[in-house]
Amino acid sequence: MTVSVLVVGRGPAGLLSASYLRQRGFDVTILADADGTMSMWSGDFGFGRSADAFESFPVKLSQSSWVAAFQGLVDIFDSFGVPLRLAPPGVILRTVTATGNLRPTFAVPAWQYASVDPEDLIIVGIAGLADSIADAQAVSYRNHVRREAIVVKLTRPPGWDPGWGAIRFASYLDTRAGLAWFTRELGAQLRHAPRGVPVIVPQILGLDTTVEIVAHLAGELGHPIAEFPLLSPSVGGVRIRDRWERSLRRLGVHFITGRAQRVSPTATAMTDDGREFAADYVLLATGGVLGGGASVTIDGAIIDDLVNRELGKMDDVQSLDRVGHPDIDCIGGGRVLAVGRALGGWNPNKDHNGGAMVLGSVHMALSMISED
Amino acid sequence: MRRFDHEDSCIKCSICVTACPVYRVDQKFPGPKALGPDWYRRLQAGQGDTMEHVGDCTFCQLCEEACPVAVPIAHLIAEHKRHAPQSPRLMLRDYLLTHPQWLAKAPALVKLPKVLGVPLGISAKTRWPVPSPVDRTQRLHRVRPVKNVPSVGIFVDCFTRGFDAPTLAEAREVLERLGFATVPLPAASHCCGAAAYASGLLDEAEHSARATWRALGRGAAQLEAIVTLNATCDDTLRSEWPRYFGLELSTPVFSFVEFVLKHASPSLFASLRECPAGEVIYTHATCRSKTARGEGSLLRLVERSSERPPRVLEINCCGAAGSYAFKSEHTGVARALGSQANQVIDGPGIILTDSGTCAIHLEELTGHRTLHPARWMHAQLELMGAPQ
Amino acid sequence: MRVVVIGAGATGLGVAWDLALRGVDVVVVEAHEVGVGTSGRFHGLLHSGGRYLVTDPNAAQECYRENVLLRVIAPNAVVATGGYFVKKYGDDDNFERRWTHQAEALGVPIREVPPAELRQALPMLTPDIERAYWVPDGVLEGFRMLTMLVAAIQARGSRLLERTRAVGIRTESHRVTGVEVEGPDGHRTLDCDAVVNAAGPWAGLVAHDWGIDVKVQPSYGLMLIFANRRMDQVVNRLKLPSDGDIFVPHQEVVILGTTDVAQPCPDAPEPDRLEAIRLMSLGAELVPDLGSWRVLRGFNGVRPLYEPSGLTDDSRTVSRDFAVLNHGDRDGLAGAFSVLGGKWTTFRLMGEVLGDKLAESLDMRLPSRSADTVIEAHRTTQATSRRHPVDRGALLCECEGVYESDLDNETASQTQMRFGTWFSMGPCQGTFCAHRVLGRRSAAQFAQEMAWLRHEREHGLNVVGWGSNARLIALEQATKAQTLAEDLS
């Protein structure tokens, strides 16, 4: 008899759980009332501190499990066409933000810029793209790493209007005309730039054809080229979300739309329109306050309505992003498990370990399900 | 100005923009956030100048489903449409197109657009449905609930009534096979209001909805359930009626797919799976069936009933969207959306979808036969033979 | 004839405007930026006087007169929304009687409103309303008025010196001859014939610098901003003015006010979460569904109340009226004046009264013209909407519709720009627009300006962290810390 798992939530933790579970042959249903936070996020897995992170991590996994988890992550992303670059053991990659800061990470989609050591960069600014502030970004970058940051600027594309956000730019670059425009303009700007210096561009290099666009540009321009992520909605996150959900559907994961209202210790979920979904296990991948897995009342109680549990008080938390269930084993003696970046009081914002937390917690939950 | 729950909850994450199918194919479309919550906030502040492209929204509601803070984005956009100026010519057209109950009464009228429609702004390109023979659709017999047999109502939507008699007939046979007597409802042609709502004609939508609700109310109370054949009508009855018009039904509403999944026995599914696998099945849960209940049910129905795993057509909204594709200014977007199905289709097969207008649209754009799941289930049951 | 005015809030600019119209050469010195004090931190009510009919008849009468006048002379900064006073069952009948009586006595027009009309206009109000009255309340768009006043004053040859602190005065034989200031250009003395202390809650400190004792009673009030303009008229509770009893629709938002807490210092304290919760429950007495309204932030404003008899614990009892002190008569320092207390609504009148006293003491025959001179709309407030869409550049702030072309004025301070455009003040509270706007202003100052704005936004946001606003806060924190890695900078 196939073991059934109901995953509540379709953010990074929900989709990752579904992938691993399906790989292992479980019958997987995803129940969600909204998109998850996938498209708020560029798709790199944050990992700030290495040594002491493992010490205080609420997820206890052996070294070998971590290695397996990392490799599994690369395989899953690979299966739906997103090449992931993994940091070498003991090393942290740093990716550059839209404001020129550096963020530590351990796994980055290959289209996103990341490096182990700081290097000179060419930063591309794009007129008409609100999030592109290349001059300010370059100043920040120089101040942080004491390396050169050369700014080149592109003019607005034909057909542009003030409402064009990153998604619109990306759709345009997916077209033949858009790619030709971009290649021509960037080529002209790079004519006098020092050869071989990596070029970073705002994350607009297509939604569907990014891998091809990056290869094309690198070939045409003679510079390594990669993107830096922008804010929500993240083109990188949308690329991954679309490919990932499509592949899960193909693998037979059932997507159900509905607002879960209550999850019982016997692994049954009730929706607000009266439907009932019974499974052998429920994974709560509902996120913390940001994902909607916890709500805050006016008087400051932070509550997970699904399992009717108070997770904290506003007066006690410095960061709302850290609010989550204290433990993976949530209710029902191992039948309802909580996964995700907000877990155990860990602060993913402070330590930049949200990605590691998602990965680690999903693995831990998997091992708990598999052991039964 | 109408008021909505969560009208002011937008946190500007713009996830709705990433979920919008029109935004991806139409460079001029400002997207759901700009047209919905951003515009509505200005409207409340007395600066509600309408935006040029608001009419290009298909009202698929995928934005609304994606929203993490439950902003009724699509319904705010419908309110925006209501405020947008429309030329008298297009107003006339919209008024006609959003009263499909009239067309359902006299389906032969669809032959007129070729002559009269184009000047009215009706697309010459979009394929129109073929009317069903009148005798099978117009005279829905008042079937009284049968004693000792559980009875369910089948909500006969305008499309099914006017153009898709076989789906109604075969859906009834499937449900009877599951042990239910069926009662087609309502007796006369009524529209649930979905078409008018999608075009921003909210008063007309409410008027239609109220009339339908009254027509349903008489017979429905004695029934176990009302089963719908069209996902848009299904969602309209279930969520828009109570939320926006205050119309409650005492009888629970199920889509055909969900109802069959709930009531067919495991042994029936097991027997179905033993039948020789037929053609490749491509499933397209319509946008409104995704937003209301999720696409998982259609997928599961096909998985349970056939050995051959179904393929999912990876399109969010096919562009038919009720009357949307019939409006000439939307032909391009509607065809761009529906044609995306061809990226998945790589061989012969049939498409299953839970809306008649989507079916003819997809059939035209893919060249693949497109059916309601009820008809496919019916065929599977025929294959299987008599009940055991 | 030259006068230095200390303080560029509503009071100082009102004084400067009145004096400039009399042909006086005015220099306004502002320690920070225009409107960063009380004038930029109020609920936006253009008083009809209704609120003070019983407790402060003089203030009520002045408010009504100025209300009528401002509609004529500053139509671009005033919105005649109208307002209601509503009496709930159980509220003091006696107060209502006194209130209606006073309205008639003082000439403030009120009109009893049938319940059906009230429900039509404001369906969100509690059904527990026994009686309601319409009053000519309105909305005074403070940011816009300040911008207009600055432009109007400058157009008449007067000057505004921001980030310039008045540190002392120069006197000759007990007469003021100059004001010593410290600003971007260092220390200098501005020669003048008179100086006006219009420093609002800081007026006591300014006077102290002159060796004069002036009893200013600062009292702060917490206000909550709701994301959408969910009501179109002002709503007051018909009872003794108290906490949480007034809603003011202001442009795209609604503001609920206020608390009233006396404090010794003039600076606005950080808003407090428990006070915000209390204000919510008070507001819910009028709007039962208030908990479902998206709240954006809380902020404190400091009233510069004047209490001739000294400090008090109960600031509600201190008059809302204003006072003009001629320190020549009062303290033997000729040419020095203070304008104290008052309301935004009466800013012009304060300028006129001060101007009259000043003119009289300097023996000038210069009548006030501020009552019949229109304050023109500032040209840039409408410039953007006339542009061709593509010329506006990228849309930077989606909440308030701020485009690249709105940042034309490179010399404007961040605060001025925010007052002018409202960027970062909408539903995202700067989460998505702060870097877009500040990154275009100055690459060199970018990191500093970002840090300052984030802090400024967060301290107002975090006190109202519930409902969907909690989700926004979590998104803001994640965007700042993760997507932009600002904490690592």
Image (spheres, coloured by chain):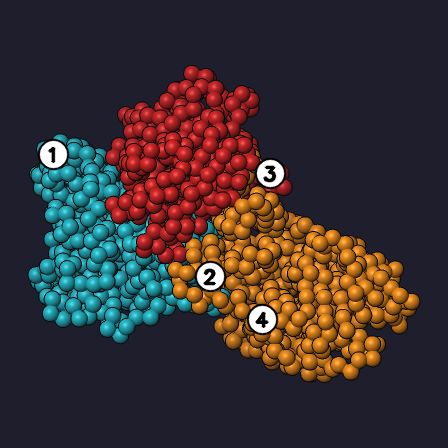
* Marking on residue B41: 2
Give the residue type that dot 2 points to.
Arg
Q: Colour of chain B?
A: cyan
Q: In the rendered image, which residue does mark 3 sit on?
A: A317
Give the residue type that dot 3 points to.
Val
Say if residue C149 shows up in the picture: no
Q: In the rendered image, which residue does mark 4 sit on?
A: C77
Viewer-nearest of discs 1 and 2: 2
* In-image side of B289 versus C245 (left or right): left
Which residue is more in the foreground, B204 or C476? Answer: C476
Tag 2–tag 4 contact (CB < 8 Å): no
Q: Colour of chain C?
A: orange
Chain letter for mark 4:
C
C25 w.r.t. A262: above or below: below
Q: Tag 4: Cα neighbours inside 10 Å, few (<14), some, or many (≥20)? A: many
Q: In the rendered image, which residue does mark 1 sit on?
A: B277
Mark 2–mark 3 distance (CA, rounded to whole Å) = 32 Å
Q: Colour of chain A?
A: red
Quarter of the image where the C terminus of chain B is located: top left
Chain letter for mark 1:
B
Question: How far across and down, in percent of the image, does residue A225 sit?
Answer: 37, 35
Q: Tag 1: Cα neighbours inside 10 Å, few (<14), some, or many (≥20)? A: some
Give the residue type that dot 4 points to.
Ala
Residue found 13% across the figure and 43% down from its top: B350
Mark 3–mark 4 distance (CA, rounded to whole Å) = 41 Å
